[in-house]
Image (spheres, grey):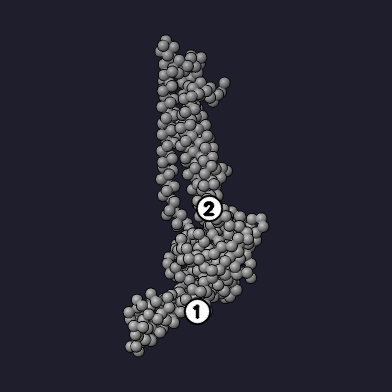
Amino acid sequence: MSLWKIAWRSIQHRALASTLTAFSMALGVALVVAVLVVYQVLDHSFHRSSQGYDLIVGPAKGGSLELVLGTVYYLQPPRGTIPFSVYEELHSGKYSSEAEAAVPVCLGAYYKGFPVVGTTSEMFEVFRYLEDRKYEFAEGGRNFSDDEPFEAVIGARIARETGLGVGDTFRCSHGAPDSTEEHADEFTIVGVIKPTGTPVDRALYINIQGFWLMHEHEDEAAAALQEEIEKAKLQLQQGERSEEDQASPTESGEDHVDHAESAVDLEALSEEVSHEHHEGERRITAVLVRRDWSNAPRAMALPATLAEIPDVQTVEPIQEVERLFDSLLGDIQAILLIFAAMIVIVAGIGLMVSIYNSMSDRKLEIAIMRALGARRATVMAIILFESILLSLGGGLIGAVLGHGLVGILSPVIMEKTGVQVGFFNFQVVELILVPGLIILASAVGYLPAVIAYRTDVADSLKA
């Protein structure tokens, strides 16, 4: 009979104690596996969320991280805008040879707290997600048409949580996500994007033409405010501003104009309004660019070239995402793994105590094996093999439990974060657990094995 089989028979003989010992080991391993799987999936999700484009061109206001959080994850709209002409130059102008694809985005509108993104149909035609997957629409749906300004498509999470579907209409609110002030224009949903596990799932996408039309009334109000400011400036210059004139501004601008106490104040307010609302000029939040790497030197030089445009900055999203991920989740993973490792070590100590306590009951068994010719090293090996079998068995059960836990929680994780995880999200790093458990089992099994090695045959048989 092999030594492994003898060790297995010994485990079976102490079935209850062995099961509890293996289960304690399994809990620690399950936690380690769950942490590794979730961390790796989040890592891939963070990095892949910005795939499809490798450069973001946006307003110089705010930092590069703010631009990435706004345009990639839709967490908040970046401050400021850039001229639509920047997109035109990248799409079909002097920079088009360096840009394989360029798509404009407009942010700042919401529907029930979810971001509404103004863009073109190319968003879902030229870009891919999760490395090289094409965007697909649920049955009965399609991409919106650039010729229909009030068509829209929505992400899978939007459809699930709001109940919207193909043929339904919605109105956008402007400003804060919780704003209740809706625009009068209605958008018709023509497609629902199949789940992607990216921020696309929790956004609504409208034709950029419709986005501009929706905001035209704001430009009209800004023009009216500018007119009132000019009137007030003229009155101050002429010294003819009467009490009746001070009450004349329109409702949209009276608060601002009435609080301007000097020509300097009015001039500053005028510049602010003209900067935010450029009459006759289309503005966008950013341009998503996939560079043409067939000419690598020019592709690499494109960010520096675009950075020369006034009030424009360029960001490589992958670099920002990596820094964000490392700063937010790197330490968290280390802490969780330390706690999980401590649980495994405690389980290993429990394994040592369990085998150690069984040694007093096994002295006769060990003495008989020695009397039948078993060497001390053989007896010691049997105890070590028993420890290794319990550790590996507990580790295997723990791996199944860990993946099972991830699979059970996958719907919740998907709903809350948009990250797709499942039972079969195996990570190569999990293979390190095998030699790790063998080393741990050998270490904790050494003391009981030494006791077995030193067992006196004569004394044990007399007892």
Identify the residue at image location x=41%, y=83%. 230
Residue 148 horizontal side relative to residue 259, left or right? right
Pointer 1: what residue? 279
Q: Is residue 120 above or below residue 399?
A: below
Mark 1 belongs to which amino acid? Glu
Q: Position of residue 145 (x, y in %)?
A: 63, 67
Q: Which mark is residue 418?
A: 2
Identify the residue at image location x=64%, y=55%. 138
SS category of the residue bearing label 2: loop
- Closer to us: 306 or 85: 85
Q: Is residue 216 above or below residue 448?
A: below
SS category of the residue bearing label 1: loop
Q: Could you classify mark 2 by the number of other residues whose Cα lies within 10 Å: few (under 14), some (14-19), or many (20 or more)? A: many
Q: Which mark is nearer the camera, 1 or 2?
A: 1
In this rendering, does residue 369 appear at all? yes
Residue that extends furthest to the bottom in the rendered view of this protein: 238
- Closer to us: 188 or 25: 188
- The quadrant of the picture occupied by the C terminus is top left
Residue that extends furthest to the front in the rendered view of this protein: 244
Q: CA distance from mark 1 to mark 2?
A: 39 Å
Precedes in sequence: disc 1 or disc 2: 1
Q: Position of residue 363 (x, y in %)?
A: 44, 17
